[in-house]
Image (cartoon, rainbow, N blue to C red):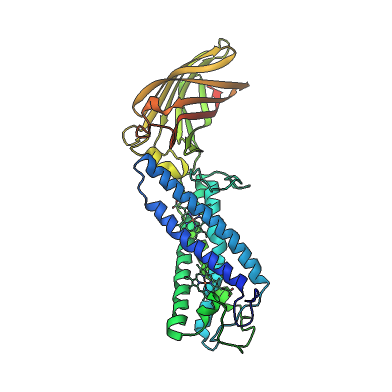
Amino acid sequence: MPRANSPTSYGSVARALHWLTALLILANIPLAFLAENLSRGTDADVARVAATYSLHKTTGIAAFAVALARILWALSQTRPAPLHPERRVETLLAEAVHWSLYAALLIMPVTGWLYHAASAGFAPIWWPFGQSLPFVPKSDDLAAQFRALHGWSSKLLVLSILAHVAGALKHAFIDRDGTLARMVSGRTQAANLPAATYTSLRPASLALLAWAALISATLAFAPATPPQTVTATSATGNWAVTAGTVTFTSKIIGTDVTGTLPGFSATINYDETRKTGTLAVTLPLAGLTMGAVTQQATGPDFLDLAHNPTALFRAGIAEQGGQLVATGTLTLHGRTAPVDLPFTLILDGKQAHVTGQATLDRRDFAIGSAYADETTLAFPVIVTIDLTASRS
Ligand code: HEM
Ligand code: HEM
């Protein structure tokens, strides 16, 4: 069997690459739907969902590698001419669908990968090359855009595959010509087809137009997530908070996932000369985000925001061995437990910059009680604060 294409049939390399991509894509799509619909009730369920997403992502990346090889190979090859060039509309549609499939082979894995890199997900790609991408920050807004692009692109991909397979079946069972056979075995019935019938730009333009319309419509209508700027308001006290962020990080199935709190208000009294003071922080939790697991984190199994919408931290500030520490209690998820928050204070005229980190144990607050060990969700939760205050 010749390796290269001829004007009438596909060579062994093109055929092998075609069927390998087909296999990867046709396995990959059901995996995504399976992952979305698996139940998430127990520890083992969540691990299964993560593994299914990881398999989807990994086969997606593999499909991308094969697709790149396939496109590079196709560029170096003659393309077999259609068996019925006189059927102009049919040939145009078949060709447009081929171009659409080539576009999908690039757009699907790239949007999926970008979505993965921008979101605080917990299902890793199974490979040793890291999970982030240069120039792609973790951002809920960006992740939502890539997610919408990936989801809507998959609809055009599925449509193209349906049209493509229907066409192949029509050739095999209605026309009974050699179209399917020349992609399966390289055999061809047509020995003297005119070569180079594929010079028209029309099918490629048609496919390009469909993809451009889909991508622009998705970007125009994609649901924008609410802006992630934290509203830090100051109540009373001799220091007023002007800006700040509170984030928390948990290890979910071995991967660090970071969440952001939507805002807080604080009353701070601090005596710089004695280095003592008091602190009362109210944290409204509605609007908390945690990437792909926001819904689970805020739902009844974890923070249960419907019943516990606010967290409270009350503390006294004192210096302990040269380190400022806010020692107090945190009320979260209806439970109160002691928490120490060591922090660094940098005073610059009327401005103060505060950074600190505390490690909580989720069991102290009965969070995720159904997850008794650390297989799915680790016990420590690292809370990080970074805020700016000014003297009031
Ligand atoms: C050829 C490659 C790929 C194909 C054909 C594909 C196809 C799909 C499909 C059909 C869905 C379901 C969309 C929906 O429910 O509307 C999906 C979802 C998803 N894909 Fe892919 N995908 C590919 C590659 C990737 C890659 C490389 C990644 C990440 C590295 C990825 C990550 C995801 C994720 C995280 C979801 C869930 C989206 C959600 O949160 O709803 N995909 N993919
Ligand atoms: C069961 C599934 C499939 C069948 C039966 C099938 C069948 C075929 C056949 C018979 C051809 C040759 C058409 C001709 O000679 O004019 C072809 C070409 C092609 N197929 Fe498929 N295919 C399948 C799945 C896929 C999938 C999943 C993709 C990609 C996502 C794909 C992408 C392509 C492309 C891009 C071409 C054009 C090759 C070229 O000339 O450069 N196919 N397919």
Q: Nearer the viewer, residue 42 or 351?
A: 42
Q: Nearer the viewer, residue 303 or 314?
A: 303
Q: Is residue 212 in sight in this rendering?
A: no
- Give left or right: position of 35 versus 208: left
Name which residue lies at 54% across and 48% down.
126
Q: Quadrant of residue 111?
A: bottom right
Q: Nearer the viewer, residue 346 or 337?
A: 337
Where residue 44 appears, x then y in whole percent?
A: 38, 42
Where residue 359 appears, x then y in whole percent?
A: 49, 25
Name which residue lies at 57% across and 48% down.
127
- Give left or right: position of 166 versus 322: left
Name which residue lies at 50% across and 64% down.
23
Count up the numbered dots. 0
Where residue 373 appears, x then y in whole percent?
A: 41, 32
Where residue 314 appears, x then y in whole percent?
A: 43, 20
Q: Quadrant of residue 11?
A: bottom right
Residue lying furthest left: 307
Compared to residue 43, the image places residue 80 above or below, namely: below
Compared to residue 157, the image places residue 228 above or below, namely: above
* Quadrant holding the N terminus: bottom right
Compared to residue 108, the image places residue 198 above or below, namely: below
Residue lying furthest front: 1
Name which residue lies at 46% across and 81% down.
172
Q: Is residue 178 in sight in this rendering?
A: yes
Q: Nearer the viewer, residue 118 or 252?
A: 252
